[in-house]
């Protein structure tokens, strides 16, 4: 080949290469422009979407999204925009619901569509990566979620609560005994109490039989998980999916954190499964040796003996036990801490509660069969859940298909938040909503302004039976309106409502029978801005109240109550 031919060939190859590179660059540039344009358009407010703060193209409302005490910002937005506030979180659509009527219409009446959960990439892919390996609270609304939830009725329905009541009572009596340390280990004791009930009823193991540092291990695992949910701490991979691909060595340390959380939770739920199997084996060998079959042992028995019983894999059973405890502990402890702080802050209310528990207990700590007589204490718990709703925005729900409401359009996949904070602070509904006034729940079972309650009752044709003796107010249903929205609503409403309120009533009544609740040395701060933590649940920054024995006779009374209830619990779970 002549030199000229070689040069010309090389030259034309170079031209081809150049053309090729230019084409690739052009294709990449066009793809980036298309992707950016689509992203930017996706961050704009959809047509007929509820009003909300102005969006920034490319970011939506991300710049305005609060990362701390979000409910306070949501409340300001409610005052500007009303019952429904529409937001763009990146390209995702979010609607905040601020009124009970809208919650009823959407979550309750249209529950079949409004019961999904947003997909959380970190939890679903890294912490709980395999199928069936998912906490109930994050499962999509599907047949497995429904089967799992239904199985909980064995311990969480009204009859389930009666079944587990002796165990809950024993754990409440134990909390009173632990407080004989004068409050030195108050927070640790609260966790011990709140873990012990769910643990015993799900897998048939008492806390006393576990290694001494289990509370610590449990809390470390909870923290590892919750840290991955706190905005600002965890990276927003659901908003910017590209962040998923950032390798660990380039700063994506959340991947290591998620692995750690996965390992800790795997150890925990394996423990539940093994204890459940242990109890099932014991029951098989000698059914009379155990008085109470735990949730896991009962499901295993049903799977073995009843042909049509729902089937669960070992992974699913392990999750079931551990998840119940996980969902119960932080919420119950936070509510209890808030209740005690309010009682310490309002000694006159504490005295009224003590008068009630003394009357009901008749010389002893109140027993579980008298809980319905603790009307004033129940009012204090309801008022605490109103003023400091433990989960102020509940958990998000999503819709599977487009929907229309009041002229608005909600595109498929929109996330909805119940803004319990705003509903609980609504001035039209509540007299002096910013104050802790348990008496409002004696006026009527909803704690509403009397005239508001009467108007709502009239509107649905209900009869007010609360007039007369205010200390024995009869619950009057206001149709489908819930007393409070702190536990969410619709088909994903907290299944542990009765368990939580029963545990709180038991523990608080026994504690107040035995102790005065004194404020910590520096006093209590009940201001939401300065006195309460900024986290996944609302709880006091300084919960360290001082339980002071009312008199020495009460020590004897609480010890007798402890021994009596322990003997019963021990006969149920030896
Ligand atoms: C004061 C205590 C508690 C509060 C404030 C609370 C609050 C909530 C809220 C707001 C939800 C989401 C509801 C929704 O999506 O509409 C929820 C879900 C859940 N709660 Fe509770 N909870 C408490 C105690 C408990 C207890 C004691 C248990 C178990 C014994 C429990 C088990 C669950 C479970 C399993 C879910 C997930 C339900 C599902 O996704 O279908 N909770 N809770």
Image (cartoon, helix red, strand yellow):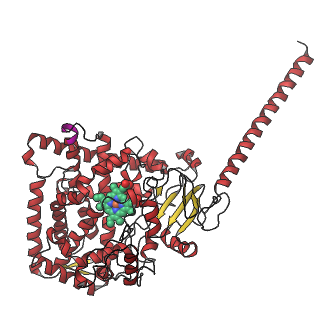
Q: Position of residue 75 (x, y in %)?
A: 51, 73
For residue 64, above or below residue 294: below
Q: Position of residue 573 (x, y in %)?
A: 13, 53
For residue 525, above or below residue 276: below
Image quadrant holding the N terminus, namely: top right
Between residue 59 and residue 255, name the one nearer to us. Answer: 59
Residue at 43% x, 58% y is 227
User: Can residue 543 be seen at all in this image of the molecule?
Assistant: no
Question: Magenta region: which residues?
Answer: 302-306
Between residue 191 and residue 103, name the one nearer to us. Answer: 103
For residue 21, above or below residue 448: above
Dominant SS type (magenta): helix
Which of the 4 quarters of the picture holds residue 160?
Answer: bottom left
Q: Position of residue 453 (x, y in %)?
A: 37, 79
Q: Going by the picture, which residue comes out furthest to the bottom?
A: 348
User: Can residue 441 be seen at all in this image of the molecule?
Assistant: yes
């Amino acid at each position: 080949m002549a030199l000229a031919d070689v040069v010309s060939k090389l030259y034309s190859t170079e031209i081809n290469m150049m053309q090729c590179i230019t084409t690739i660059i052009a294709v990449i540039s066009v793809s980036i422009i298309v992707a950016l344009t689509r992203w930017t358009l996706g961050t704009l407010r959809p047509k007929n979407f509820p009003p909300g703060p102005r969006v920034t193209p490319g970011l939506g409302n991300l710049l305005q999204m609060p990362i701390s005490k979000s409910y306070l910002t949501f409340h300001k937005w409610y005052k500007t925009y009303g019952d429904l506030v529409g937001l763009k979180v990146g390209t995702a659509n979010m609607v905040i619901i601020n009124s009970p009527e809208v919650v009823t219409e959407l979550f309750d009446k249209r529950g079949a569509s409004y019961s999904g959960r947003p997909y959380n990439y970190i939890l679903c892919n890294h912490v709980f990566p395999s199928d069936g390996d998912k906490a109930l609270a994050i499962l999509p609304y599907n047949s497995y979620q429904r089967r799992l939830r239904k199985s909980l009725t064995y311990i969480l329905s009204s009859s389930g609560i009666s079944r587990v009541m002796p165990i809950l009572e024993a754990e409440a009596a134990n909390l009173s005994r632990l407080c004989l340390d004068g409050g030195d280990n108050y927070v640790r004791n609260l966790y011990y109490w709140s873990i012990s009930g769910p643990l015993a009823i799900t897998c048939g193991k008492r806390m006393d039989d576990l290694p001494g540092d289990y509370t610590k291990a449990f809390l470390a695992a909870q923290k590892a998980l919750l840290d991955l949910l706190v905005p600002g701490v965890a990276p927003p991979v659901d908003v910017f999916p590209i962040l998923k691909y950032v390798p660990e060595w380039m700063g994506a340390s959340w991947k290591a954190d998620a692995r750690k959380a996965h390992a800790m939770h795997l150890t925990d739920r394996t423990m539940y499964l093994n204890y459940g199997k242990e109890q099932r084996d014991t029951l098989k060998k000698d059914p009379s040796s155990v008085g109470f079959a735990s949730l896991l042992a009962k499901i295993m028995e049903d799977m073995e003996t009843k042909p049509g019983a729902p089937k669960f894999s070992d992974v699913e059973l392990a999750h079931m036990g551990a998840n119940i405890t996980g969902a119960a502990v932080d919420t119950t402890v936070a509510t209890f801490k808030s209740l005690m702080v309010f009682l310490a802050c309002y000694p006159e209310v504490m005295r009224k509660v003590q008068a009630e528990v003394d009357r009901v207990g008749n010389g002893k700590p109140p027993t579980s069969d008298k809980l319905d007589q603790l009307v004033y204490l129940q009012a204090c718990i309801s008022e605490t859940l109103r003023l400091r709703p433990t989960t102020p925005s509940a958990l998000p729900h999503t819709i599977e298909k487009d929907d229309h409401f009041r002229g608005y359009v909600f595109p498929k996949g929109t996330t909805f938040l119940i803004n319990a904070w705003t509903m609980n602070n609504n001035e039209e509904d509540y007299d002096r909503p910013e104050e802790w006034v348990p008496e409002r729940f004696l006026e009527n079972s909803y704690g509403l302004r009397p005239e508001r309650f009467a108007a709502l009752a009239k509107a649905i044709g209900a009869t007010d039976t609360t007039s007369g003796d205010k200390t024995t107010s009869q619950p009057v249903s206001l149709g489908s309106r819930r007393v409070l929205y702190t536990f969410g609503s619709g088909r994903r409403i907290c299944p542990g409502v009765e368990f939580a309120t029963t545990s709180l009533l038991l523990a608080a009544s026994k504690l107040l029978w035995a102790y005065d609740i004194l404020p910590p040395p520096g006093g209590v701060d009940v201001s939401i801005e300065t006195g309460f933590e900024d986290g996944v649940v609302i709880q006091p920054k300084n919960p360290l109240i001082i339980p002071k024995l009312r008199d020495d006779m009460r020590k004897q009374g609480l010890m007798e109550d402890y021994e009596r209830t322990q003997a019963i619990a021990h006969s149920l779970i030896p």
